[in-house]
DNA sequence: TCTGGGGTCCTAGGACCC
DNA sequence: TCTGGGGTCCTAGGACCC
């Protein structure tokens, strides 16, 4: 089995460019929720030295001096473009692991093109671009970690031109040598720091380190990374998505929350979103956690954060049941005289709803509430989020996240379709 | 002034049991 | 005063990923 890692280039920026070609060739960045941090950069923005993940105010000087275009994130658009890319990838392999919104591993076991992987990669790149407008890079190798590394070089090297096949390649050691150890998939800041302290600063030196030493210092995960660099598959390929284990909806607030009623409204909103996600995935939750927090960066103001976990008597996907428990949970941890900056809801103990046939006590009511939810979901997806909602979320949303430069939801919202003047 | 959101896995240590 | 040994399960926190 060989693996191809297909990664969309500067994904969020590329999505924006599909619908606004004026953004081509100029520095563009996309901000996180609440317009907080830089989460995507065009190559031009990268070259200006704008770092990934920094709060935008730290880059303000560069932005002003170079007329960098700054956009709020538009997750409805990116999610839909992602779906299109993943669909187009199915043509190239029947084994696709969707790894993230902008990345997928392809298993090439029975690829008819196994003899000529580089042209396979180029064809794929061309086809995805033609079908979706999104530029991708392709890395091919014997393990997922090596495919990731091939992809890293494919992006970085002008000669590779976005596609690199490292399988059976005489250039493999050279590729490993020119890859800094912190760029290896699975080696983060802490591990890189430790490795560098032992003079292991490239992927090649890491690959040739002692496996037992690595396991002692970086746990079993580090050993797996090492083996993968040696060409021994040690990280599972998941062609069918496993049932997820948790689901979170949380937000930072655009303005601080100080009243319980506003917090109930916000958490009610998060629970509503979480319930929709549950039903969309055909899941039910048996454990619900609510958390609240003040602004951890504002060290001079009083700090408070807390969470509470509720075990539900039976798994549910009903928004009203989740609300009942979630709202009393938030009341139990809410303290007066703090300025809250963030809150959220996490659902765990997830099971497939299809496996839950009957309830012992309130079966009839449960089935009615499921019908209701189905209808509400349908109405909201047709006519807009929260057309139909529970009263608790209605309070004026003073806390709503900032999103001042969001592009239209061209592909998912009737009111925001692209128009040609 | 301004600092995202959503996941997974691993380990150590405590609780508990026999 | 002396204070076993071994197993399982759970959880919090850390590290990593995008």
Image (spheres, coloured by chain):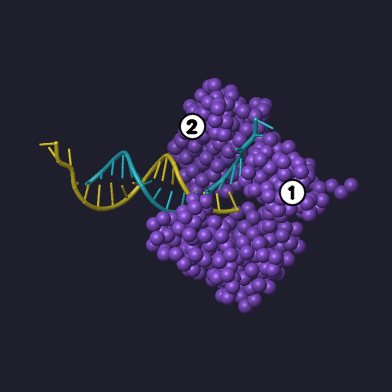
Chain colours: A purple, B cyan, C yellow
Where is A124 relative to C3, above or below? below
Whether residue A237 appears in this view of the structure is no
Name the residue beneath numbered marker 1. Answer: A28
Give the residue at x 59% y 58%.
A98
Disc 1 chain ID: A
Q: Secondary structure at mark 1?
A: strand
Observer-nearest of A127 and A61:
A61
Q: Chain of mark 2?
A: A
Residue A193 shown left or right of residue A274 in the figure: left
| Percent of width and height locating residue A21 | 81, 53
Identify the residue at image location x=47%, y=44%: A349
Residue occupied by mark 2: A306
Question: Distance of mark 1 from mark 2, alpha carbons?
Answer: 37 Å
Q: How many marks?
A: 2
Q: Vertically, is A292 above or below A117?
A: above
Q: Residues within 10 Å of mark 2 (few under 14, many from 20)?
A: some
Going from N to C along the chain, the mark reached first, 1 or 2, is 1
Near mark 1 (Cα within 10 A), the count class, few <14, some 14-19 or many ≥20, is many
Query: Which quadrant: the N terminus of chain A?
Result: bottom right
| Between marks 1 and 2 in the image, the one whose residue lies nearer the viewer | 1
Direction right: furthest residue: A421
- Would residue A252 be seen by someone viewing this image from the given angle? yes
Residue A372 image label: none
Picture layout, residue A320 above or below residue A241: above
Q: Quadrant of residue A151?
A: bottom right
């Amino acid at each position: 089995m060989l693996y191809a890692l297909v990664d969309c280039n500067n994904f969020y920026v590329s999505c924006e460019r599909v619908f606004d070609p004026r953004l081509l060739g100029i520095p563009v960045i996309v901000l996180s929720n609440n317009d907080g941090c830089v989460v995507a950069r065009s190559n031009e923005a990268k070259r200006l030295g704008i770092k990934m993940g920094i709060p935008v105010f730290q880059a303000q000087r560069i932005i002003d001096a170079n007329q960098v275009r700054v956009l709020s994130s538009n997750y409805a658009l990116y999610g839909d473009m992602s779906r299109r890319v993943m669909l187009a990838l199915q043509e190239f392999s029947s084994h696709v692991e969707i790894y993230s919104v902008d990345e997928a591993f392809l298993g090439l076991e029975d690829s008819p093109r196994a003899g000529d992987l580089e042209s396979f990669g180029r064809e794929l790149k061309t086809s995805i671009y033609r079908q979706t407008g999104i530029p991708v890079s392709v890395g091919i190798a014997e393990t997922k970690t090596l495919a990731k590394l091939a992809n890293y070089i494919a992006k970085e090297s002008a000669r590779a031109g976005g596609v690199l096949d490292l399988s059976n390649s005489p250039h493999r050691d050279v590729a490993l040598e020119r890859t800094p150890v912190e760029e290896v998939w699975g080696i983060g800041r802490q591990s890189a720091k430790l490795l560098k302290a032992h003079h292991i600063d490239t992927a090649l030196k890491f690959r040739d380190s002692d496996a037992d030493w690595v396991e002692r210092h970086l746990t079993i995960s580090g050993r797996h990374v090492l083996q993968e660099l040696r060409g021994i598959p040690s990280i599972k390929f998941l062609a069918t998505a496993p049932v997820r284990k948790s689901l979170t909806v949380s937000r930072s607030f655009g303005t601080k929350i100080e009243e319980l009623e506003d917090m109930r409204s916000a958490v009610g909103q998060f629970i509503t979103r979480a319930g929709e996600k549950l039903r969309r995935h055909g899941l039910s939750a048996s454990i619900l956690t609510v958390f609240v927090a003040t602004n951890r960066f504002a060290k001079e103001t009083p700090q408070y954060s807390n969470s509470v976990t509720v075990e539900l008597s039976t798994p549910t996907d009903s928004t009203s049941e989740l609300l009942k428990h979630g709202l009393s949970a938030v009341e139990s941890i809410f303290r007066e005289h703090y300025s809250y900056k963030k809150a959220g809801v996490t659902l765990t103990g997830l099971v497939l709803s299809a496996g839950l046939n009957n309830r012992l006590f309130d079966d009839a009511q449960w089935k009615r509430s499921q019908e209701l939810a189905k209808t509400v979901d349908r109405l909201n997806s047709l006519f807009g989020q929260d057309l139909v909602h529970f009263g608790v979320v209605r309070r004026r949303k003073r806390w709503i996240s900032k999103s001042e430069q969001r592009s239209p939801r061209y592909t998912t919202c009737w009111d925001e379709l692209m128009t040609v003047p």
